[in-house]
Image (spheres, coloured by chain):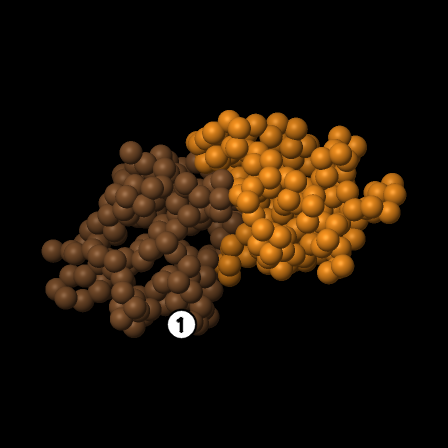
Chain colours: A brown, B orange
């Protein structure tokens, strides 16, 4: 059973290895593999409107953040980013995080959700986001410098929240 | 004759009224009409990779910035924002700024340029960007809260630099 709740400061030491593992893979997030723990904290904990953790059997297995995607006149559209620990993937945690974020975004007053850079090689995620109601709005040619594959396309995905 | 050059600190007092005028109109940029001069400085002068001014007859009539659109693995794509003083519009200054930015972006090592939120009601700009080689990659429904028109669509525009 996955439980999702707001992250507290004390969670960061368990969140960071999961975030670092994904940044280090260089295949889904633009944050460089060499991102430091301090930079990671700013990105994942300090800058967002809120950060959440998914726990299973008492351990943190996944995390997501939610934040306005633009300032002022674009701040009714939020952005979210999700990470599941490599060893915990394929068990529905990503789907649970996304479902939670869509409800949480509405509670926080957001009207739409946007993903800015969904790497085209991240096919499982793309299928999941579509299943969760997102549409591919457009595709940016060569917008992501994949650590193993070089420059690849990235999708912008979006949905109006209900 | 329009001259475009890198902005220096001393230019800020002439740049800010032009930037403020546009932010205040609430029809093209997401920065709120109530943005302060200090916030404006951060956005327009401090955060970007570089800021430029267009002068005509010795006065600053327009300005643009250029910056990476994403961190790390997305930082080869730049973003730029342009503003021409309301009284100086319709005289080719916007076009000159855009043309300058495309060359400057290549010099700075960027591989592509992306506009994240081109308000659909800003029809003259959209035509100009198309003319300058940009494509509409996709359209975000109701992504911009236009000060007079409420929620309107916004385009993402993009071009690979040559």
Query: B14 or B98: nearer the eye?
Result: B14
Image spot of residue B12 (x, y percent): 71, 55
| Quadrant assignment, res B22 | top right
Image spot of residue A130 (x, y percent): 31, 39
Question: Count of labels shown?
Answer: 1
| Quadrant assignment, res A157 | top left
Image spot of residue A26 (x, y percent): 42, 61
Up-down: is B115 above or below A62?
A: above
Up-down: is A12 above or below A49?
A: below
Image spot of residue B135 (x, y percent): 58, 35
Task: Answer left or right for A91 relative to B149.
Answer: left
Element marked by disc 1: helix
Query: A62 or B124: nearer the eye?
Result: B124
Q: Residue at x 62, y 60 (%)?
A: B46
Q: Residue at x 42, y 59 (%)?
A: A47
Kindly identify which residue carries mark 1. Answer: A37
Task: Answer left or right for B156 relative to B2.
Answer: left
Tell me the quadrant of the picture where the N terminus of chain A can be found.
Answer: bottom left
Label 1: chain letter = A
The answer to whether residue A30 of the structure is visible from this angle is yes
Query: A70 or A133: nearer the eye?
Result: A70
The answer to whether residue B67 of the structure is visible from this angle is no
| Quadrant assignment, res B136 | top right
Tell me the quadrant of the picture where the C terminus of chain A can be found.
Answer: top left
Q: Residue at x 63, y 55 (%)?
A: B41
Few, some or many residues within 10 Å of mark 1 (<14, 14–19, 20+): some
Q: Residue at x 77, y 42 (%)?
A: B61
Task: Answer left or right for B124 relative to A16.
Answer: right
């Amino acid at each position: 059973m996955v439980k999702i709740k707001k992250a507290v400061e004390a969670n960061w030491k368990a969140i960071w290895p999961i975030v670092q593992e994904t940044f280090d893979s260089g295949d889904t997030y633009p944050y460089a593999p060499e991102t430091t723990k301090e930079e990671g904290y700013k990105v994942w904990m300090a800058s967002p409107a809120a950060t959440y953790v998914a726990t299973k059997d008492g351990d943190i297995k996944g995390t997501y953040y939610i934040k306005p995607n633009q300032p002022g006149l674009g701040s009714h559209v939020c952005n979210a980013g999700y990470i599941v620990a490599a060893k915990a993937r394929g068990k529905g945690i990503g789907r649970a995080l996304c479902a939670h974020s869509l409800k949480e975004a509405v509670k926080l007053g957001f009207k739409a959700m946007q993903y800015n850079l969904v790497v085209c090689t991240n096919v499982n995620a793309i299928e999941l986001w579509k299943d969760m109601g997102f549409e591919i709005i457009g595709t940016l040619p060569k917008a992501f410098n994949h650590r193993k594959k070089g420059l690849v396309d990235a999708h912008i995905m979006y949905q109006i929240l209900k």
